[in-house]
Amino acid sequence: MKVEQIFDKAMDSYGGLHFFHRFIDKSGLNQVVDLVLGKRAPQAEYSYTEVFTSFTATCLAGGTYTEDMNILRSKNHCETDYQYCSSDTFKYVNYQLVDSMQSGNATPKTNLAEVLKAGFEAMEKAGLSYEIFRADGACYSEEAIRLILFYCQHYIIRSRRSQVRQDLIKPEECSLVDIRGELYRIYEHTDTFAGRPCRRIYYQKINQEKDLFSEITFDEIITTLTEDQYSTIELIKMYFDRGR
């Protein structure tokens, strides 16, 4: 049997990075990143997408430290058209973004619906779809949830704490459950939000030094997933696993 070998200048000891870049090019990530973060200053040598893909490519190539980005840059940049930034550039951009978020310059909630819509549309163009949307409390609004339900069948989102709702929690109706080695009090009831039936789940990690309804309040999540689909404990675990 004859074995035919095909060589490509872009294929070296870093193997699949060529396909990784082809995926990035076709995914529309550039447009999403530009929409969310904006463009870097005109004098900047690398775009946000190039900075992020430099770090990701280093990880895929087996890099352990950010300084390994310099090795990838020196070995690959001269042989391909890929724009790999240095570790110093990556650190600078990273610190810059962290500072902007801490100073309150992250995506304002008034623009959240636009950002979500752009993200969903980009995923649709890439042929991606999701049944369940998980998010933190920034998405807890009727406008955001109606948009989410247009693209996803269900959501599980952190709800804003409501003292009115928490005052209605009955101690005798709370359950004590073990979740990954930690003891929690949980409570649940049905509700309607954004025009759809939902479940409101309250959970409180037990601190042995404090009693129920001390200054520690319950955290709240809201979901359209039914009990037939997921139990209360499964939903809490699912929320804990967001971002993984």
Image (tube, rainbow, N blue to C red):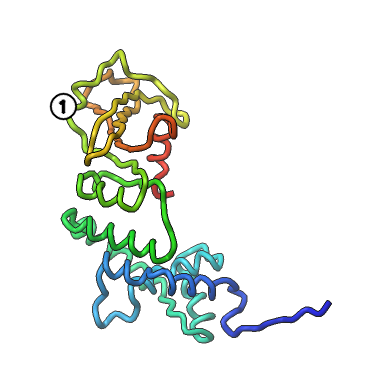
Q: Give the side of residue 114 with respect to residue 209, left or right.
A: left
Where disc 1 sits, the SS reads helix
Q: Quadrant of residue 15?
A: bottom right
Residue at x 33% of width, y 62% of height = 121
User: Whole-percent x and y of residue 7?
Assistant: 65, 83
Could you say where residue 56 lies in the image, as x and y percent from the top left?
46, 66
Please report the residue visible at 22 percent of the width from the left and 61 percent of the height from the top: 100
For residue 160, what is the image quadrant?
top left
Residue nearest the viewer, comparing 7 with 42: 7
Which residue is pictured at 32% across the width and 61% down the height?
A: 119
Q: What residue is disc 1 on? A: 164
**Left or right, residue 131 beside residue 106:** right
Q: Position of residue 52 (x, y in %)?
A: 39, 68
Residue at the far right: name it.
1
Q: Amino acid at mark 1?
A: Val
Please rate how many residues cluster around mark 1, counting C-alpha atoms within 10 Å: few if below 14, some from 14 to 19, many from 20: few
Q: Is residue 45 left or right of residue 76?
A: left
Q: Does residue 130 lie above or below 226 as drawn?
A: below
- Kindly indicate the quadrant of the structure image that contains residue 38: bottom left
Q: Where does residue 213 sit, x and y in percent of width and height?
A: 23, 21
Tell me the residue at 48%/70% (across/down): 23
